[in-house]
Every structure is written in structure tokens, then in C-alpha cells.
Amino acid sequence: MTLPLPASPDGADRAFQVDLRGLVDLLSHHLYSSPRVYLRELLQNAVDALTARRGLEPDAPDGAFGIRLFADGAVVRVEDDGVGLSEADVHTFLATIGRSSKRADGIAEQRGDFIGQFGIGLLSCFLVADEIHVLSRSARTPDAPAVEWRGHGDGRYSVRTLPASARPRPGTTVTLTPRSDTGEWTRPGQVHVLGRHFGSLLRHPVTFSDGTAGAPAVSVNPEPAPWARTYPTPGSRSRALAAYGEEVFGFVPLDTIELDLPAVGLKGIACVLPEAVPAGRRHGHRVHVKGMLLSEQADEILPEWAFFVRCVIDAESLRPTASRESLYEDDTLAAVRDALAERLREWIARAAASDPELLGRFLQAHHLAVKSLAVHDDEILRLLLPWLPFETTDGHTTLDEFARTHRTVLVTSSVEEFRQVAAIASAAGLGVVNGGYTYDRELVHRLPEIRPEASVADLDPATLTAHLDPVDRETELAASAYLDLARDALAVFDCDVALRTFHPASAPALLVDSREARHERTRSQLAREQEGGLWGDILGALRQEAPRAQLILNQLNPLVRTAVAIDEPELARTSAEALYGQAALLSRRPLRPAESSLINRSFLDLLAHALRKDS
């Protein structure tokens, strides 16, 4: 319903009209993630009212003020012993959308003590009900009367003043009559579950009752947060925190890290995941503000590299957004994120210094996360680089062990380059590390910072070929005709052919080619095709002299010795193409269409030759 306004003279200021149904629809689809938040909003308002009541009566004993939830299938009721509302408050705060009592004169300067500050929470009740009934009595004025407010989803509301006997004690009761289509959020069992979900860490006592005759009310938050309890021993504390982490997240933590930032009133735990997770996958964290659950998916509380933990925290000074489902990005949040990151670094440092067994299990699962941190953190680099596993020509090992065996550590720029050369480099006694994985090449190059005696260099194809033994002159002359035919057959790939001896003898050929060289040759080819045009000039200006690929045949391999002795030109060409295709497949790099075609053609030609020979 849109509220009508009287006509105004031209040029006069006008007030905005509000369609309450449209506003509620906007909230349900764009602000709140689910209708279930109605109970969180009611709990939040009750907690804020209790906070204000405590400000009026600071000497009241602990537990004197509480919150009571009730649901029997017909109504949902939330009652608190908070500060309450006067008739003037009701007109000001319940009838004006966006007006919050937390911004009222006299308490605006203390509004950091309150969870909500936006004045729209009560509207969330219209997600599950068409009518909201509020009965309140102010604690600010002795003998204050009770005030009744009824609001309707079509924009109407009414206010009545009632005798004090209508509500004997100060506080507020909000009663909802649920719509028939919202039973999944308002049934007694669901209200109890939602109460525990949102309010399990609230500092004020919260109880639930379903109206069953003789059944006592049950506590929603019977115990304080696990980190706020006392334990007989450090071991029992650790076990209790781990058990809480398992209850919340559903996995047994590898370890739990206590989080405590007194400056912002933050406490909680970080649970280390027991298994690896894909790089960059950011798990949601459970964030409570003043005990109220704010979000289960707050990934902004930790930096991106900390994807090996999931956190439960409760903070006093973090600001929620208007939906109360995420955190407001400000300087405080940035400072908290940095401080929590430092706590994780300290845990890693402690494990490295005093618990090698724990560190080993952690690195086995989360070495990629630690590598991403070590790239930018000199202290973590110094502590953990010797422990981190890398793929090398000696198998999976640590750089510390690898550098003891190989004074010069060579590192490839890609996974495919490593796979091309690994077996042959190992047989030649070269120490090569696969630098194609994320962070690995950069970290290997920083090895001399930890071990000054180690030398690190990028693997140059010339370095590898220099370790391959040349064949004797007689053998090379005998194979020259074959090598010429092979070079002609592979000229389309800008590939030279050479004959060497190397181990293992089971490897017939080695294709030495870098990704950068292939890209440069592709660019040169495009430049030639576009010669004379604008793109040809641009590509020509970028062109550099790229090293040719090299197919190195292994004279120690029986198949190669047979091939170089072939005297039929077509069969020799086909065998050279087949050796090139096999070497390209072993490199495990993506094949170009022309290479795939060559492999298929050479296979069929060799098969046809074999069949002709047999017949």
C-alpha cells in the first residue's frame, strides 16, 4: 500500500511515499538471505534492549535480565526484560522506517554497544507474518504505562496506551501470527533450532518454550563460549576446543589455534583443516558480533592465503552491514584481518620450532598454502622453506635435502619442460626442480637466502644438451643421410635433428623445446602470413630470433640404431616423424593440430609398411 499525500504547491518540498509491501519484497530478495532471519532480528533487538537496560541499572545481578522465546504453532513470541519503549518511542521508532533507537539522542555515542543500528530489523517479521504485535513498557520512567503497537503488512499501524498491569515488568514482547505458507520457519521445533543457531553464544540467558503443559522452558545458550570457560588442564582445554570445532564444522581439526584480540574484544578459534583444499578456495567463517551469529560465510575475516583454516570468532567492535549477514569493510576489519593473519603465522612458527610431527602432517596437507605465504613472508620462508616438498629429479623431496646432493639446483619454468627432461637429466646427474607449479620457481630461486652455499639457475636447453655425449665421427657420417631426411620432414615444426648418446637407453628421443620459443615461432609465422599489412608490421616489430626446437635421437636405443640405417627415403621420413610424435607425447604438453595429424599419419604409414612387408 502506498500512503497518499496531500497536494503541495509547485516547488514545495514533498515527502517520499513508501510502499511497505514493495519494501518488504525488496528486503526478502536483496537484503536478507532467507526468511529465517526474522528470529535473528528479534533476538538482536532484544539483546540491544537488554544492553540499554544494563546501562540504566549497572548494579543489577548477572542473569537478572533475559530473553524468552515461545512458539506453539499458532504464534511466535519473543519477550525480553530490556529497556522497553514509551508511547513517544513507539511513534518515533516503530512507525518510521529506517529510524533506529540506537541512533536516538542520548545513546548515539554509545551505539557501538549495540548489534543493530539501521532501524529496519522489525520489518523482517513481515517475511513470515502479516501482523506484528508489540507490547512494551519503558524502564526509563517509574510506573510507566504499557504501550501496544500493531503493524500490518499493508502499511497500517495502530498505537494504544494500556494500564501498567497489562505488562507488570519493563521490557518488550513481540508476537507474530505466522502466515500459513511460512510454517517451515515458525514451527516450534524450527524456532528452537533457529534460536540455538543464532543465539548459542549470547551473553544473556535465552530460553525456549513450546507451551506444552508441565514442560519446563529449555535453555538456548546453557554454556558460555568454549574459549570463555575454565578447564582443569591445558590438554582438556585443547580437547574441548577441538570438540567444539568438530561440532560446528563437521571435521576433526588437525589442530586448533586460539584467537584473542583484546583491542577489539575478539575471541575464538581457528580449526586447521585435516585435508588439502584447492588453492584459493575460501571457506566461510562463523562470525558472531556480541554473541549474535552474524554470518557462516564471512570469508573477509582472513586473508586469501589462509584457506587451510576455518574460524569461529566472537567480536565486540566489528561493524555488520545493514543485512547483518556480513561485515562492513573498514579500517577496523582490515586491522583485525592483519592481526589474525599474524596469529596464524605464529602458530606455524611454533609448530616448526617445537612440534615437527604436527608440522609434517600440516605441510603434507597444506604445502601450497604455506608456499603462497612464504613467497611474501621472509620469516615463514626462513622457517619453512627447508621443510617444503618439491618435485625433483630425485623424486618428491625437500629443497634442503636436494641441495645437499646437488650443489647447483636447476629449475624449469613449466611442468611440461620438467617432464621432457626429468629422466635424462637424472641419468646425467643433473639436479632439476619442477618450477612449473604455483610459487615453486620463485621459492627455489630464494633458496640461497637460506643456504648461501647453494646455487640456483633456470634450466637452459643448452645446459642439458651439453651433458649429452656426442657420437663418434664414423657413426655420425653413417647416419647423415637419415638426419638430412629427418630435418626435411620436421622443418614444418622448425625442428632440428641431432644424434647423441644418453641414458636411459630406453628413451629413443628427446624433444628440447620451450614454451617461449614455441610462442615466438608462432608469432613469426603470423608475421610472415600478414606481411605487408598493419598486423604484419606490428608482429614483425615484436619478432625476436627464437631458438629452434631440437629432436635429439639416442644412439644407445636399439630402435634409433635401426632407424638411422633405413635406406628407403619415405620410410626414413615416416620413422623420423614417428620419433618426433612419440617425443612430443612424452613431453605431455598440448599438441598442435599439425602434430596430432603427423602422429596419426606416421602410425598408419608404419602400419601399412609392416603389413606390406608381411604380405
Image (cartoon, rainbow, N blue to C red):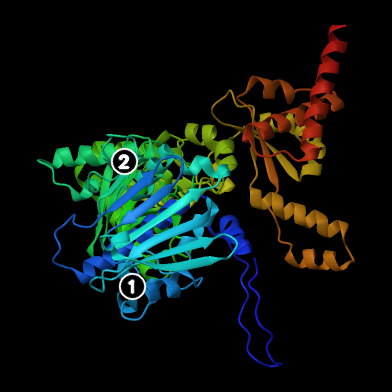
Q: Quadrant of the N terminus?
A: bottom right
Q: Quadrant of residue 480?
A: top right
Above or below: residue 530 compared with residue 588? below
Q: Quadrant of the C terminus?
A: top right
Assess disc 1: are there few (<14), some (14-19) or many (≥20) residues with their C-alpha within 10 Å of its C-alpha. some
Residue at the spot x=33%, y=37% of the render?
247
Q: Earlier in the sequence, mark 1 or mark 2?
A: 1
Q: Is residue 304 visible?
A: no
Is 554 on the left-hand or right-hand side of 580? Answer: left
Question: Which of pointers 1 and 2 indicates the residue nearer the eye?
Answer: 1
Secondary structure found at label 1? helix
Secondary structure found at label 2? helix
Assess disc 2: are there few (<14), some (14-19) or many (≥20) residues with their C-alpha within 10 Å of its C-alpha. many
Q: Quadrant of residue 399?
A: top left
Q: Nearer the viewer, residue 429 or 189?
A: 189
Give coordinates of residue 474: x percent, y percent.
67, 30
Three-letter amino acid code at disc 1? Arg
Q: Furthest-right residue in view?
A: 532
Residue at image mark 1: 111
Q: Nearer the viewer, residue 480 or 548?
A: 548
Q: Furthest-left residue in view?
A: 232
Is 510 on the left-hand or right-hand side of 205? Answer: right
Give coordinates of residue 80: x percent, y percent.
31, 57
Above or below: residue 193 compared with residue 455? above
Is 581 on the left-hand or right-hand side of 282? Answer: right
Query: Label 1 vs label 2: CA separation?
Result: 32 Å
Give coordinates of residue 165: x percent, y percent.
28, 61
Three-letter amino acid code at disc 2? Gly
Q: Nearer the viewer, residue 247 or 474?
A: 247
Residue at image mark 2: 245
